[in-house]
Image (spheres, grey):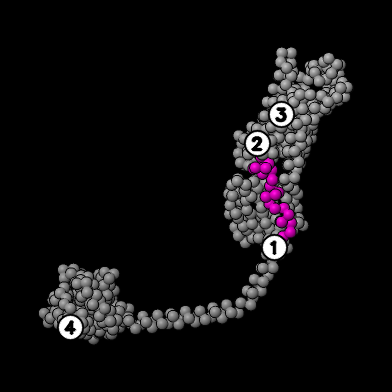
């Protein structure tokens, strides 16, 4: 026998080696079992083709020939089943209509086995090594092509859909293998059946196509681990820990449940996990909507939520993606019982309640003391009758402000004002009306001032105003506005049938020139300024009152 006669057996052994490699190198899942069955079917064709050449009895040759074509019918069904499982449509196989998938293959296999009147195959020259294929052969080829077309159609729809990238990667690998196998089978039919009379027989074409397709599948299994979700989840480890662990594929189909979780959740491998149903069974201490939105819309992100169930258990649920080559292939969900932690926290909280109550009492006392201090501080710097600053605060404030203005050479002004003939108001209407007049006058003066101005009671019916960063012209304008505002103010007092009005005399001192000597003793300099503005006030009184006397330094 020449080399080509041994081609089929060589290809069989290569396929067998690949079968053993897949079997020993991966964790066997349901999908791997389907693939291994598919791979075993692929191995039958080359061994049967080799056996035909190794025996001389035509009836034995016919048995091997029929077996190889029956295997081809099974292989076609295997293509389709493998495609259905791979694309996540295995639920379809649970319906009664799925039985129709097997009918064409069974009819084709029956025709092969019966070979009525040689309409499938006849020997040439008394041997099936060279043979003639009848009309049933072409019917069988048509059925096989139909299976291939259905498989390719399913794969095409998946590649054009919004399925996860992992599913599309799997489909692309299988699609390459099936296309290569189909091309070699068609090439074998064309060269060795259709053109049999014109060309010499080329053995091993179909076997070689089967081998190439198997290589595509094995590369995908070994390199991309496209079927190996359970191995990724480290099944041997998760069964030994106390946390409940649930492993899902990227369609939320349950792949594995560890022993800790099985008694608590009514879940079965192969069914879809409904997280919304779990969330409705408990009361969440977090935001369910936010957790659910992250789970559904952002599957690559980790998320967590704590649930309280009717039996009093507190369960912390965390989700995390399973990735291979940066592609999400599934999810791990862990369930941790934190009830004991909550019990310890509640016990600790009970022990701390007395201390917390004492702390609250101390805080309340501190707040009361702080408020009392604030009131005392406010009373120390304000005038009780009018609520504006008193003379003590103003003189302390002015010592600092004078140094500031001297340092930066900024002009400022002082206004000292006195209510004209205030003694007559007290004598004619009483001290209560006099106090009301002072309060009313203070309110209208405050409306004429700027936020930066400081207004204080200097004593009796005298008031002083500090005008920072103010030029002589600005100070004169403000003094005129204050004088006219007070003059137009009307006081309506009880038991007095008419309104009262007053006038004021104003002494205005504008400071624009500064020397270093002033900064050496600010207290003395301030006393000098107060004496100067006081003189200006008395000049206004001596000149007839209801006027402004302005001086500058």
The answer to whether 12 is drawn above or below residue 229 in the figure is above
According to the image, label 1 marks what residue?
A: 337
Magenta range is 220-241
SS of the residue under disc 3: helix
**Label located before the other in sequence (2 or 3):** 2
**Label located before the other in sequence (3 or 4):** 3
Q: CB under 8 Å between callouts 3 and 4?
A: no
Q: CB under 8 Å between callouts 1 and 2?
A: no
Disc 2 to disc 3, C-alpha distance:
18 Å
Q: 382 or 231, which is in the foreground?
A: 231
According to the image, label 4 marks what residue?
A: 528
Disc marking residue 208 = 3
**Which residue reaches farthest front?**
2
Question: Which mark is in front, 2 or 3?
Answer: 3
Q: Is 221 one of the magenta-colored residues?
A: yes
The answer to whether 14 is drawn above or below residue 439 in the figure is above
Q: Residues within 10 Å of mark 4 (few under 14, many from 20)?
A: few
Q: Residues within 10 Å of mark 2 (few under 14, many from 20)?
A: some
SS of the residue under disc 2: helix
Please state the horizontal and vertical placement of residue 93, each as a whole percent of the image: 76, 37
Q: Residues within 10 Å of mark 3 (few under 14, many from 20)?
A: many
Question: Which mark is in front, 2 or 4?
Answer: 2
Disc 3 to disc 4, C-alpha distance:
116 Å
According to the image, label 2 marks what residue?
A: 173
**Which residue reaches farthest bottom?**
427
Disc 2 to disc 4, C-alpha distance:
100 Å
Q: Is residue 340 left or right of residue 165?
A: right
């Amino acid at each position: 026998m020449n080399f080509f006669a041994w081609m089929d057996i060589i290809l069989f052994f290569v396929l067998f080696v690949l079968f053993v490699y897949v079997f020993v190198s991966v964790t066997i899942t349901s999908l791997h079992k389907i693939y291994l069955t598919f791979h075993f079917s692929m191995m039958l064709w080359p061994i049967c083709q080799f056996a035909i050449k190794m025996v001389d009895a035509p009836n034995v040759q016919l048995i091997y020939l029929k077996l190889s074509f029956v295997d081809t019918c099974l292989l076609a069904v295997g293509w389709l089943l493998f495609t259905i499982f791979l694309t996540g449509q295995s639920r379809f196989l649970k319906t009664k209509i799925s039985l129709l998938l097997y009918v064409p293959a069974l009819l084709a296999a029956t025709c092969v086995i019966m070979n009525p009147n040689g309409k499938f195959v006849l020997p040439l020259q008394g041997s099936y090594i060279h043979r003639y294929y009848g009309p049933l052969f072409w019917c069988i080829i048509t059925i096989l092509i139909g299976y291939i077309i259905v498989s390719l159609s399913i794969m095409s729809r998946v590649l054009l859909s919004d399925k996860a990238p992992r599913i599309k990667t799997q489909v692309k690998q299988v699609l390459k293998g099936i296309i290569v196998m189909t091309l070699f089978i068609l090439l074998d039919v064309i060269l060795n059946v259709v053109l049999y009379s014109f060309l010499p027989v080329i053995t091993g074409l179909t076997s070689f196509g089967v081998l190439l397709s198997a290589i595509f599948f094995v590369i995908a299994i070994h390199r991309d681990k496209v079927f190996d979700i359970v191995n990724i989840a480290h099944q041997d480890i998760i069964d030994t820990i106390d946390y409940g662990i649930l492993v899902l594929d990227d369609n939320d189909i349950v792949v594995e449940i560890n022993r800790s979780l099985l008694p608590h959740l009514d879940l079965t491998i192969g069914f879809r996990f409904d997280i919304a149903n779990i969330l409705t069974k408990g009361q969440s201490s977090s935001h369910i909507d936010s957790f659910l939105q992250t789970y559904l819309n952002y599957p690559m992100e980790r998320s967590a939520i704590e649930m309280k169930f009717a039996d009093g258990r507190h369960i912390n649920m965390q989700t995390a993606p399973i990735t291979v080559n940066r592609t999400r292939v599934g999810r791990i969900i862990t369930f941790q019982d934190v009830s004991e932690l909550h019990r310890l926290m509640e016990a600790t909280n009970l022990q701390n309640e007395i201390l917390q109550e004492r702390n609250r009492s101390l805080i309340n006392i501190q707040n009361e003391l702080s408020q009392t201090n604030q009131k005392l501080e406010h009373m120390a710097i304000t005038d009780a009758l009018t609520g504006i600053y008193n003379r003590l605060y103003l003189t302390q404030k002015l010592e600092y402000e004078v140094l500031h203005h001297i340092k930066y050479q900024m002009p400022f002004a002082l206004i000292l004002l006195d209510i004209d003939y205030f003694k007559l108001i007290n004598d004619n209407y009483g001290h209560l009306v006099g106090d009301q007049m002072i309060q009313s006058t203070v309110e209208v003066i405050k409306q004429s001032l700027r936020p930066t101005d400081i207004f204080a009671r200097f004593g009796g019916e005298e008031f002083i105003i500090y005008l920072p960063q103010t030029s002589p012209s600005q100070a004169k304008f403000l003094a005129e506005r204050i004088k006219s505002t007070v003059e137009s103010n009307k006081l309506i007092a009880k038991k007095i049938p008419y309104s009262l009005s007053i006038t004021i005399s104003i002494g205005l001192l504008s400071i624009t020139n500064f020397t270093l000597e002033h900064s050496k003793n600010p207290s003395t300099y301030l006393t000098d300024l107060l004496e100067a503005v006081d003189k200006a006030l008395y000049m206004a009184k001596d000149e007839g009152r209801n006027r402004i006397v302005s001086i500058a330094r």
